[in-house]
Image (tube, rainbow, N blue to C red):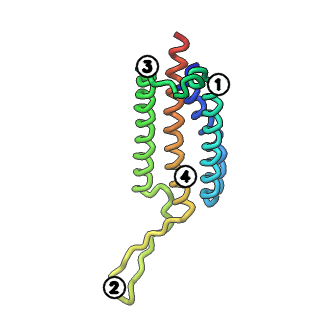
Amino acid sequence: MSFHEKSAWACLVSILLAYTPYFWMVFQHPMAAVGLFVLSAIILAVLLTAFHIVNALATRSIRKAGDMPAHDELDRIIELQASKLSGIVLAFVVVTWCITVIYGVLGISEVAHAETLGDPLTTSRLVVPVMDILSGVHALFAGFVIANLVYYGRIVAGYRKLARG
């Protein structure tokens, strides 16, 4: 397994380990987001740092040269294909989220008309519950995380496809 494939595996597994509990909690309790986000980011950073230190120590060429192996043409093609697929997934998520927000499926609870100081003109007031806003933000962030998982998953699949022949 090449250095780049191991790195893709580590990123894929680390993202899953760091953000699965995060999304499990915030979709049940949206107000707990800030502390959990910071904790998940720290966990992700620690996992990736630990992996890259171990991978660098275990990879002989890095120990001798002190430098990460350069990307060859095949690595670039695999990463380009992964970027294209994750870009498509991310675009789909963002467009879907925008359409959802524009058409108010996130839960507009009330549109109230109020008169201003006896003036016969009325103004509209749109009230959106905080929980719906937070759920929408978490859904958008989940889309970014899913796009990253697709990116690293596609890289791993590209290397596995080469290994099988």
* Residue named by callout 3: 74
Tell me the CA gap for discs 4 and 1: 37 Å
- SS assignment at label 4: helix
In this view, the mark in front (1 or 2): 1
Is residue 78 left or right of 22 when viewed as pictured? left
**Which residue is at 43% across, 55% downward?**
101
Report if the CB atoms under discs 3 and 4 are less than 8 Å apart.
no
Of the residues tagged 3 and 2, which is closer to the observer? 3
Of mark 3 and mark 4, the one earlier in the sequence is 3
- Of the two numbered discs 1 and 2 on the same chain, state the one appearing first in sequence: 1
N-terminal-most mark, 1 or 3: 1
| Image spot of residue 36 (x, y percent) | 64, 53
Q: Quadrant of the N terminus?
A: top right
Q: Is residue 61 above or below residue 97?
A: above
The disc labelled 3 sits on which kind of residue? Leu
Q: Is residue 66 left or right of residue 90?
A: right
Q: Which residue is mark 2?
A: 120
Please identify, in this view, whether the residue under mark 3 or under mark 4 is nearer the observer.
3
Q: Residue furthest bottom?
A: 118
Could you say whether the residue bearing mark 3 is in a helix, strand or loop? helix
The residue carrying pointer 4 sits among few (fewer than 14), some (14 to 19) or many (20 or more) residues within 10 Å by Cα, namely: some
Q: Is residue 43 above or below residue 68?
A: below
What residue sits right under mark 4 in the picture? 138
Amino acid found under the numbered disc labelled 1: Ala
Q: Nearer the viewer, mark 4 or mark 1?
A: 1
Q: Using the rendered image of the protein, determine whether residue 80 is visible from the camera's viewpoint.
A: yes
The CA distance from mark 1 to mark 2 is 77 Å
> Is there CB contact under 8 Å for labels 1 and 3?
no
Q: Earlier in the sequence, mark 2 or mark 4?
A: 2
For the image shown, how many numbered marks are present on the structure?
4
* Disc assigned to residue 58: 1
Q: Residue at x 52, y 28 (%)?
A: 67
